[in-house]
Image (cartoon, grey):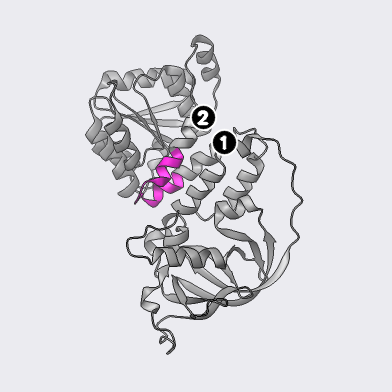
Amino acid sequence: MARVLVTHPSPVVREAHRTLLQACGWSVTEATSRRDALNRLAGPASRQFGDLVLVDLSHWTVPGTALIRSLRRQLASTLPVLALLPLQDDNDLALEAASRAGANLVLSGHAGPQTLASAVSLLTGQHLPGLARLAADVHGDTLDLNDVWHQQQLLLGLPDHAAATVVATRHVFELLLSRRHDLRAAEAALALSQLAGGPVPLRRWSLAHDPECPPLRLAAPRALPLPPTLAAMLVLDAGGQVYGLPLDGPVGPSCWWGDGAPTPAHVSDASLAVPLVRLLGPTGFRRLLATDRATVVLSHCSDPAGTEVAVRVDELQGLQHVVVQPYSATLRLASGCVGMGLCSDGQQVLVLDPATLWRHVAASRQPGAATPR
């Protein structure tokens, strides 16, 4: 049975939500204030209080959004958060504040009981008998799954989200995929399972597999899978994700060093190296643990000027032969990688596209340039 933590200072508001949710079959716990909610969700016993946090922002917008922000940044809570806007017609500021704080789904204050119950069902991944009975009694009140999908896309497009928000958003994408029935849902699920966990690749994935995107709704012949290949690679760790960087290609690593080793004499601008996690996104909570202890310099064989760019990573694991299963064009776009690799020791790696990486590093080093998303 899913557990919902309902947070609002008014006992009348809390009781209205508790009555609805308990009628559908969920277990409900109430929190009367921001401090009360944080105390319940802090520590090892937090899971007994909820699988979902419901924050009603009516007459409580500023403390409510502050609670969501504290959940994500102070407690690093990855629980899905559902926020209900006040009843006023003009709620743009409240909507933006709740999204920036890290709410996974924001519903209008005028949303009916079926929409609210459906949202709880989606975010907890549980469909209960009471929900079907409620649907039979309510007409014209439904949850738009495309709107939920697009809210996750917008959430990942906002800057500086805590890692816990990204993990929660990924969970919501997984639940939404389970309800997809288009021809590309299986490919989208495979791409999601192989992505690094940061906001940048997850953002790319969501845009490539948008359920309203026309190519996703048109029937297309299934392409034959590409055969695996064997390639020599530099294997490295960045933000908790292991990557392989191919050595054979027009763009490749010309030198690398780490753990305080001296900079090679011919490298003049290693200080301008761009952290790889800034380009591809970190995995989960490793964002704060990334140490950038090693540097990899890339060169382009067709560049007459001999230009080089450098990226910073956490650890160099050495040169290995890797069996690569190439991605389709869609998966390459979604992940920024050319395929999934398997090392001789059984370790899985994401195989970077050196040419794309070169372009991203060069673009990020331009004055005032934003990180490619």
Q: Which residues are magenta?
A: 152-168
The question of residue 162 being in magenta is answered with: yes
Question: From this viewpoint, which residue is outermost toward the top?
Answer: 137
The residue nearer to you, when weighing 129 against 220, is 220
How far from the left and from the top, in percent, is residue 369?
A: 36, 60
Few, some or many C-alpha atoms within 10 Å of disc 1 (few <14, some 14-19, many ≥20)? many
- Residue furthest to the front: 304
Taking the image as shown, residue 119 lies to the left or right of residue 94, namely right
Q: Label 1, on which residue?
A: 211
Q: Name the spot of residue 285 as percent of width and height, x first.
A: 42, 56
Residue annotated with mark 2: 145
* Residue type of the residue flagged with mark 1: Pro
Q: Nearer the viewer, residue 113 or 308?
A: 308
Give the image location of residue 146, x and y in percent.
Answer: 51, 31
Q: Residue at x 24, y 23 (%)?
A: 10
Q: Residue furthest bottom?
A: 265
Q: In terms of secondary structure, what is the magenta stretch mainly? A: helix
Disc 2 residue type (three-letter): Leu
Q: Is residue 27 left or right of residue 352?
A: left
The kind of secondary structure element at disc 1 is loop
Horizontal side of residue 124 vs 346, given as left or right: left
Q: For mark 2, does the 10 Å Cα neighbourhood hold few (<14), some (14 to 19), or many (20 or more) residues?
A: some
Give above or below for 50 relative to 352: above
Q: Earlier in the sequence, mark 1 or mark 2?
A: 2
Distance from Cα at disc 1 to Cα at disc 2:
9 Å
Q: Position of residue 145 (x, y in %)?
A: 51, 29
Q: For the point 45% across and 47% down, which residue is it?
A: 167
Total labels: the figure holds 2
